[in-house]
Image: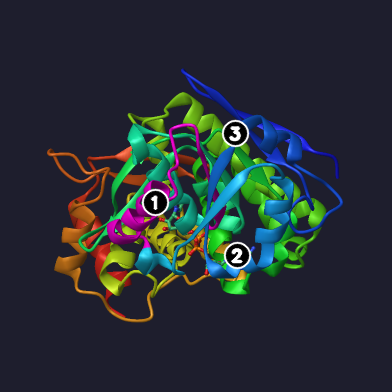
Amino acid sequence: MARETTWVELPETRYPILFEANWLAGTSASCRDVLAEHVGKTALLVSNQTVVDLYGDRLMSELEGVKVDLHLIPEGEANKTLAELEKIIGTLIKQQHTRETTLIALGGGVVGDMTGFAAAIYQRGVPFLQVPTTLLAQVDSSVGGKTAVNHALGKNMIGAFHQPRAVLMDVAVLKSLPPREFAAGMAEIVKHALLADVSYLDWLIKKQDLILQMDDVVLSEMVRKSCEIKSAIVAEDEKEQGRRALLNLGHTFGHAIETLSGYGQCLHGEAVAIGTVMAADLSARHGWISEADVERIVQLLRTFNLPTELSESLDIAAFQAAMGRDKKARASGLRLVLLRALGRAEVVSDFDERLLSETLVRFLKV
Ligand code: NAD
Ligand code: GLY
C-alpha cells in the first residue's frame, strides 16, 4: 500500500496524518523523510516498556543522526498523572533539552496525551510528533491536539490544546495489540459513525468480519475514514467551542464510569462503549431514535467484543456528581451529547431529567 496523507487544517497551522504501512512494524517502508523534516538535532522519545520493546529500535533507526533520549512511562491509565508528567519534564531538564527539541510520543493514548501535555508546557511549548500504536490512538487521541492527565476527582481534568507537527501511522502495528485493546479502539470508531456518518455505520456492519480478521486493506480504510471524520470536526472547531463536543458522544457517561470504577479497571474504550449505549438509551427515551436503533448499536458493539453494560453497580449520586464535573458541563448545568438520529449527534442541555434518571437506574443498578 502506497503512502497516503490527510491534512488537519486549522486556522493557524496545518499538519499531516501519514498512513504508511510497515514503516514501524516492518522495514519495507520508511518515514525517514517526514521525521527529518520535523525533528532537529535532539529529541525525547516518550513511550512505555511494552511498546519500546516492540518498535523502539525501528523508530530509532529511522532517526539516524538525531541525539535521542528515552523516557519510559509506567503502563496504564492509573499512571496518567501529574506526578508522572513531572518526571518527563525532569528528564527534559536533566538531559538539557532546549526549545529546539522535539518530543515523540510512541504508544497509545496514555503516552500520547502525556507527551503532548509535556510538550505543551515544557519551556512554554515545544514541538511534538505522534506515533500512535493502538487503534484508539490512531483513530482518535493522536489527532486534534487535546492533551491531558487525570485528577483523582476527574478524567483529563488537567491539560492543554497543543497540536502535533505530524501524526505517523502504521496500521501493521495493530497486529501486536492485545484483543481487548483492539476492541477498545473500535468503540471510538463506532462513535465516529454514530455521530457523523450513518453510511460509515452501515460499512462497519458490512465489513465486521474482515475487521475482526484484521484485514490490512479494510483496517487501513477504517483508520483513514475515522481520521477524516475527526480531522474535519477539529478543523471546524479546534478548541471545542461548539461542534467538537460531538466527539464526546458517550464520554460524559464513560468518564464517570472510569472515574468511579478506578482508572484502568475499565479501559477507556470500554467505558465509552457503555457510555454510548447509555446515550443511545436516553436518546430513545426522548423518542429521537428507536429501540431497534439502540439494539443495532448494542449488537455492533458486542460483535466487536465490547461491553454494553456494567458488571458491577455504581452509586447513582456519585455518578451524577462525576457527570457534573465533566468538561462539557456549564455553570447553567449538564450538557449531554445525544443522538437525534443514527449518524447525527447534538449537544443537548434541555434533556428531560426524569428520563436521565431512568437511564441511570437501568444501567447503574446491576
Ligand atoms: P493505552 O495508551 O493505555 O494503551 C493500551 C495498552 O496497549 C498499553 O498497555 C500499551 O503498552 C499497549 N500497546 C500499545 N501499542 C501496542 C502495540 N502496537 N502492540 C502491543 N501493545 C501495545 O490505551 P489507549 O486506549 O491507547 O488510550 C487511552 C487513553 O487515550 C485514555 O487516557 C484516554 O483518555 C485517551 N484519549 C485521548 C483522546 C484525545 O483526544 N487526546 C481521545 C481518546 C482517548
Ligand atoms: N476525543 C474527543 C476530542 O478529541 O475532541
The disc, 3 or 2, on the residue closer to the chain's N-terminal end is 3
Percent across and percent down for residue 237 are 42, 27
Taking the image as shown, residue 142 lies to the left or right of residue 346, namely: right
Q: Answer yes or no: is residue 59 visible.
A: yes
Mark 2 vs ligand 1: CB below 8 Å? yes
Q: Identify the secondary structure beneath mark 1.
A: helix
Q: Nearer the viewer, residue 16 or 135?
A: 16
The quadrant holding residue 39 is: top right
In the displayed structure, would residue 344 be above or below residue 366? above
Question: Going 69% across and 49% down the picture, which residue do you hit?
Answer: 222
Between the C-alphas of marks 3 and 2, the distance is: 23 Å
Whether pointer 3 and pointer 1 mark residues with C-beta atoms closer than 8 Å, the reply is no
- For mark 3, what is the residue? 40
- For mark 1, what is the residue? 94
Q: Nearer the viewer, residue 40 or 172?
A: 40
Magenta range is 80-108
Amino acid under label 3? Gly
Magenta stretch encompasses residue 303: no
In the displayed structure, would residue 315 be above or below residue 48? below
Amino acid under label 1? Lys
